[in-house]
Amino acid sequence: MRLLHPFMPFVTEEIWQALRGGAGDPTVMMASWPVPEADRILPSVEADFEVVRTAVRMVRDLRAKANVLGKVHLSMAVSSETSDTASAVDRQKRTISKLANAEILDAGIDLPQPPGAAVGVAEGLRVYVHLAAAVPGSADKARERARLEAQRAKVLSGIEGADRKLAQPDFAGKAPPAVVQRERTRREELAGQLKALDEALKGLP
């Protein structure tokens, strides 16, 4: 009830009053926020979920940019940068395939880009989606190059912004260490994406 209250205030308040029986907080609005139980927090499951979310999002983005409907079944390959990510993909292959509506033909570490495949790039992960077989003309090389170059420009802008921030004495010297480290980590992630995008661009004919 407490988690649902911000979205359904009147209904949850009515149920709260019916359930509390005169005990506990007089209104759900004054109730303490739920405290998660430590033994129910599973970092490995959260990491797997992030891999699934990222892979599915990239496939859906590629579909949208190529005007390929979600109901059209595709085929794809998933390339990971680390063994941990590759293991997560292997464990969640069925889930990724179902949510992306695409058969995973290949999955592994540092897979080469298949000819004619559209590529989606994220930190530690790449998806190669075969769009042309489903919709002729969807893998137009000029359009794919333009898409990758636009994504590269956005990532490069993010790197330059991070470099400017990290170069500022007021930021590096006065900001909390955790904030500075978060910006450095973000910069490293963007650099990895830039490298992957450059490789994808080189792979285009």
Image (cartoon, rainbow, N blue to C red):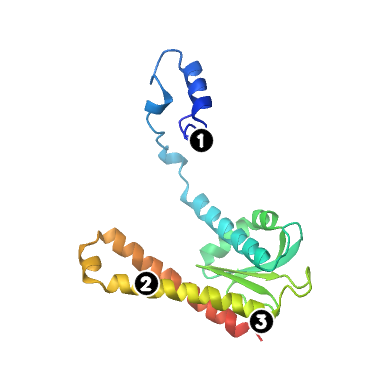
Which class describes the residues within 10 Å of circle 1: few (<14), some (14-19), or many (20+)?
few
Residue 67 appears in view: yes
**Residue 176 spot, x, y in % from top left:** 25, 59
Q: Quadrant of residue 111?
A: bottom right
Tags 2 and 1 touching, CB below 8 Å: no
Closer to the chain start, of discs 2 and 1, is 1
Amino acid type, callout 1: Phe
User: Residue placed at 47% from the left, 73% from the top?
Assistant: 155
Q: Mark 2 is on which residue type? A: Gly
- The amino acid on which the numbered mark 3 sits, given as a three-letter code, is Ala
Residue 175 figure quarter: bottom left
- Label 3 sits on a secondary structure element that is helix
Q: Are marks 3 and 1 in contact (CB under 8 Å)?
A: no
Q: Secondary structure at mark 2?
A: helix
Residue, x 45% and y 44% (percent of image)?
Answer: 41
- Horizontally, residue 16 falls left or right of residue 203, namely left
- State whether residue 204 is above or below residue 189: below
Residue at image position (45%, 76%) is: 156
Q: Earlier in the sequence, mark 2 or mark 3?
A: 3
Which residue is disc 3 drawn over?
Answer: 142
Cα–Cα span, label 2 and label 3: 29 Å
Can residue 113 be seen here?
A: no
Are discs 2 and 3 less than 8 Å apart at CB?
no
Which residue was labeled with disc 2? 161
Circle 3 packing at 10 Å, graded few (<14), some (14-19), many (20+), is few
Measure the C-alpha gap from mark 3 to mark 1: 45 Å
Q: Is residue 163 left or right of residue 79?
A: left
Tag 1 residue = 7
Element type where label 1 sits in the image = loop
How far apart are labels 2 and 1 at the CA level?
A: 36 Å
> Who's the residue at 66% across and 86% down the image?
205
